[in-house]
Image: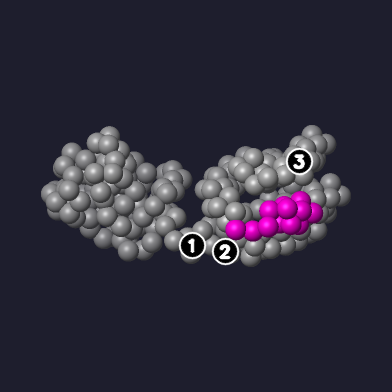
Amino acid sequence: MEINPNKVNRQGLPSQVAAFVRFEILRGNLKPGDRLPTEQEFALQHGVSRAVIREAIAKLRHEGLVVSRQGIGAFVASPEAANSLTLEPNSLAVPEDYRHLYELRLMLETGSAELAAVQRTDEDLAEMERCIDNMAKVTDLHSAYVETDISFHRAVARATKNPFVALFIAFVDVKLQESILVALRSLDFAKTSAISHDEHQLIYEAIRAGDPAGAAAAMRSHLTNSSRRLGL
């Protein structure tokens, strides 16, 4: 991965440089304690100004991914020290990245369904049912279908009554939204959507019945099957 200043405007360069460093850290190519190149080395390597590098490093320092040592330079901190949750498009560069993100989704949403079966209210159930009904009304493949699908999962997350669960699931789902839409274009939409609708219905019924284990199992089955259908 390299910075190409010809592809972005000047104001976007610091963010692009920061994304490059973030990408290398998350992939393990830059490890905690590693020293970053000097401003001049970074600037020459990627064809940008030293001011761009300074702004990018400041951004990473604010996120907690980089620490500066006076008179020595900038060093990689640990990803666990991050102050904010950020996932740039370049962090999802290959199919393996999406598979890993889908695995995270499986872990988060299985627990979400389990907790929702305990905490859900009548209003939550009504929202889930509305989402499933909307899914059934979509007859052609377009973004509306994926949006209604994701809306159901967010309704389940909100039913946990844990705002952090809802926040993290919304973050992961929105990153997967475009890849799901692209993958669906290669499938028989009518058949796939019908199967998916039935799987969502089973999740809903388990949550409505107040069955945590059943809800978790239904969600796990749906996401496992979905990942196979999408080639993940």
Q: Which mark is residue 232?
A: 2
Where is 38 relative to 31, above or below? Answer: above
Of marks 2 and 3, the one in the foreground: 3
Q: CA distance from mark 2 to mark 1?
A: 7 Å
The answer to whether residue 187 is seen in the rendering is yes
**Tag 2 near tag 3, CB within 8 Å:** no
**Magenta span covers which residues?**
186-198
Q: Is residue 138 left or right of residue 34?
A: right
Q: Estimate the x, y position of residue 52 in percent, counting from the top left.
A: 21, 40
Inter-mark Cα distance, 2 to 3? 26 Å
Q: Which residue is the site of mark 3?
A: 137
Relative to 124, residue 74 above or below: below
Q: Is residue 168 visible?
A: no
Q: Quadrant of residue 139?
A: top right
Kindly identify the residue that appears in the image at 51 percent across and 58 percent down. 98
Q: Helix or strand or loop: what does disc 3 sit on?
A: helix
Q: Which residue is mark 1?
A: 95
Image point (37%, 44%), residue name: 63
Classified by dominant secondary structure, the portion drawn in magenta counts as: helix
Tell me where residue 175 appears, x and y as whole percent. 52, 48
